[in-house]
Image (tube, rainbow, N blue to C red):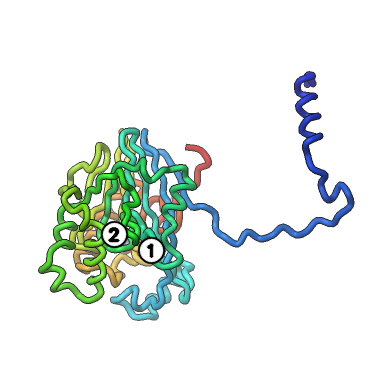
């Protein structure tokens, strides 16, 4: 290699600028301090011409598995937890919004808890910043359903919109249910907070919330899919660019190690249980048949992968991590 004068000068300047290292002057090196906190959690991949990013909002611990899966004896739930390597006493549910940049629109699907959840949630804004995304640049928010872990992050507790320039687009059925006083008066006590949270988040902008039907495009390339059952107006989304497709599946299954492997397990929050189980099989059969990748809101990070049919259930196969796009 030719060592030019310019390179030599550059190397000499660096050497002069470097501080004296401890080992160079005979001082013992201290052990490195432990960092003590998690790395930023966002993950990018390409889908045709689109760029997709999944982002972590945090996790919540489930106190009692038998109150989480509500139609099976504890013994059977424990067997399923053991088979999925989920500690019986530490079942944790992750929250994972998906961001899609179509080249024309910057679309956030679900918004996490914002500052309205517990101490182990509300990481979306931090992870958006780490991913280099300004919340003001998001032009569209889509919501799979109005449970607080998906909707709360639209608005901070103090009242400010977290995504001030975004149009909010939701399934007409879901909006109708959660803003209907009759439904609210008939709802089980456990859902009262979700009705109140819908008023808090969407009330101030009700006239601007765009409501559309299943089968319609929210923005070019992102179509609402009827996935009712977990909630009365639940929507999943098919994101399509050219021949490439992705299903943003929402809460059609919660933890795949439990509810995809055992699709007849009923989640406490499945509001219309029989319909939720039918929808689960229908959508999982669809992604299996089309070999369509998915992102799943409550899936292990980065919550991106595929399903195969295994016996009576479905097995989630995480997509291979890619260091390039
Ligand atoms: Zn959820």
**Residue 44, above or below 14:** below
Task: Locate residue 286 relative to residue 136 in the image: left or right.
Answer: left
SS for dot 2? loop
Q: Quick check: 31 left or right of 212?
A: right
Residue drawn at x 25%, y 37% is: 220
Per the image, the residue denoted by label 2 is 252
Could one spot residue 110 in this view of the protein? no
Return the x and y of residue 112 as percentages of the image width and height: 36, 58
Q: Which mark is residue 255?
A: 1
- Residue furthest to the right in view is 26
Q: Quadrant of residue 242?
A: top left
* Residue behind label 2 places its C-beta within 8 angstroms of ligand 1: no
* Left or right of 54 in this view: 164: left
- Give the SS element for disc 1: loop
The residue lying toward the viewer, choosing from 231 and 192, is 192
Q: Specify the quarter for ligand 1.
A: bottom left
Task: Report whether residue 193 is seen.
Answer: yes
Q: Position of residue 304 (x, y in %)?
A: 41, 50
Q: Is residue 57 left or right of residue 226?
A: right
């Amino acid at each position: 290699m030719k060592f030019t004068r310019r390179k030599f000068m550059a190397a000499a300047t660096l050497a002069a600028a470097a501080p004296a290292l401890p080992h160079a002057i005979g001082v013992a090196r201290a052990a490195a301090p432990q960092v003590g906190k998690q790395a930023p959690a966002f993950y990018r991949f390409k889908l045709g011409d689109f760029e997709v990013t999944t982002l972590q909002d945090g996790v919540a611990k489930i106190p009692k598995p038998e109150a989480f899966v509500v139609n099976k004896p504890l013994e059977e739930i424990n067997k399923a937890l053991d088979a999925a390597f989920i500690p019986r006493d530490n079942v944790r549910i992750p929250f994972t919004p998906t961001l899609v940049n179509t080249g024309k629109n910057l679309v956030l699907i679900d918004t996490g808890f914002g500052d309205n959840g517990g101490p182990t949630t509300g990481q979306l804004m931090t992870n958006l910043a780490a991913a280099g995304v300004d919340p003001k640049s998001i032009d569209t928010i889509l919501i799979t359903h109005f449970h607080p872990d998906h909707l709360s992050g639209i608005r901070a507790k103090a009242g400010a919109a977290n995504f001030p320039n975004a149009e909010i687009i939701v399934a007409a059925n879901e909006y109708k249910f959660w803003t209907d006083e009759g439904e609210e008066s008939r709802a089980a006590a456990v859902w009262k907070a979700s009705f109140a949270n819908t008023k808090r988040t969407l009330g101030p902008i009700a006239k601007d919330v765009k409501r559309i039907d299943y089968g319609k495009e929210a923005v070019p390339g992102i179509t609402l899919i009827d996935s009712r059952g977990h909630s009365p107006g639940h929507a999943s989304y098919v994101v399509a660019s050219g021949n490439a497709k992705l299903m943003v599946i929402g809460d059609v299954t919660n933890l795949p190690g439990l509810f995809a492997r055992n699709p007849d397990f009923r989640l406490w929050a499945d509001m219309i249980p029989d319909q939720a189980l039918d929808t689960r099989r229908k959508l999982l059969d669809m992604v299996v048949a089309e070999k369509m990748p998915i992102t799943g809101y409550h899936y292990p990070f980065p919550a991106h992968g595929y399903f195969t049919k295994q016996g009576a259930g479905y097995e989630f196969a995480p997509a291979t991590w890619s260091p390039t796009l």
